[in-house]
Amino acid sequence: MLDLVILGASAAGCSAAIYSARRKLNFRFISDNIGGEVALSGVVNNWPGIIEIQGFELANNFANHVKSYDVEIETGLRATAIKQAGKHHIICFKKATGEEECVETKTIIIATGIHPRKLDVPGEKEFDRKGVTYCTVCDGPLFKNKITATIGSGNAALESALMMNNIAKKTYLISKFPNTTENKGGFPKGEDILIEKVKTMPNIEIIYSAKTTEIIGDKKVTSLKYKDADGKENTLVVDGIMIHAGMTPNSDFAPVEKDKIGQIAVNTKCQTNIPGIYAAGDVTNIPFKQITISAGQGATAALSTIEYINRWKE
């Protein structure tokens, strides 16, 4: 019988693991990978104490801090189901080999984060990694002096376009929103400083009120189609497409209360509606998806778990 299983090895999960290790809990730390979306970020300059750092380096720092407590991070494991056995929880996960394993635990912290949302248009799946990418930081340098398109209207899309401005010959930025004051100039969820910067870059052409309808190519991407505000279909010749259309929570395995987009509902102690199951970080319904907030939630979830275990009765 374990005290705890922590799922997810990014800011929230690593923070929870550090607090759990310091309290000498008997726990396992399980994750599909190390770092999650943090590892795929570009330059991070809002982590207190470090003025500027690459996302993958910060993620490695998180993992190394956990390992300094002699905690093993078991990677290549994906949670598939959580079942109840009285007060206990049975959590099952699948290994990269396809083998399945289930373990029994008093508590669980779900810190599995989010993953990129797909457009679900023809050609997207066929040309994934053949010109289509969901990580500009990872794949942007492959398109040096070429023509690219970034699809999205949030900070990730704005940052993608700014990065490609320094790499590509030309970058299209495709927003589904109109260029109006009500929509912050086409980017309602974007930060003002990023919006202003994007609009001053000579190599970035912004296309507003556009809905991508198809991705076209042969062995690799050659163009994309989109419909404008009048319903007219247009074609852009591009070599690469960066899709930043939002994120989906990694919560499908969890039998807890969620909102309409799958975010796990938690209270101020990171408790879910099931006693003994906690959630932290971007997988939850917290209003802001930030690394610092996720780390704080991880600590909160761990302390709440410790409080729960201290009062444990069979």
Image (cartoon, rainbow, N blue to C red):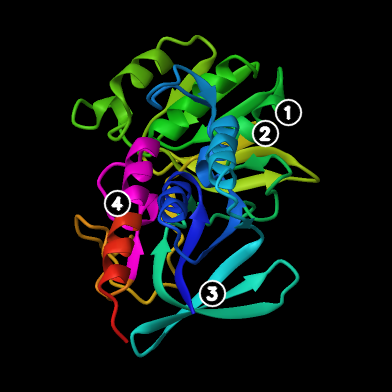
Q: Which residue is mark 2?
A: 139
Please give the count of numbered marks on the rendered protein. 4
Select label 4 or label 2 by which is in front: 4
Which numbered circle lies on residue 300?
4
Span colored in magenta: 277-301
- Of callouts 4 and 3, which one flags the residue occurring earlier in the amino acid sequence? 3
The Cα atoms of the two marked residues, 4 and 2, are separated by: 35 Å
Determine if the magenta segment contains residue 146.
Answer: no
Task: Specify few, some or many for label 4: CA neighbours under 10 Å numbering under 14, 14-19, or 20 or more.
Answer: many
* Marked residue nearer the N-terminal end (4 or 1): 1
Secondary structure type for disc 2: helix
Q: Evaluate whether residue 52 shows in this view.
A: yes
Residue 89 x, y percent position in the rendering: 42, 80
Of marks 4 and 3, the one in the foreground: 4
Give the residue pinned by disc 3.
Answer: 80
Question: Amino acid under label 2?
Answer: Asp
Q: Which mark is residue 142?
A: 1
The kind of residue on which mark 1 rests is: Leu
Q: Are marks 2 and 1 in contact (CB under 8 Å)?
A: yes
Which is more foreground, mark 1 or mark 3? 3
The alpha-carbon separation of the residues under discs 2 and 3 comes to 29 Å
Q: Residue at x 37, y 25 (%)?
A: 48
Q: Is residue 310 above or below residue 199?
A: below
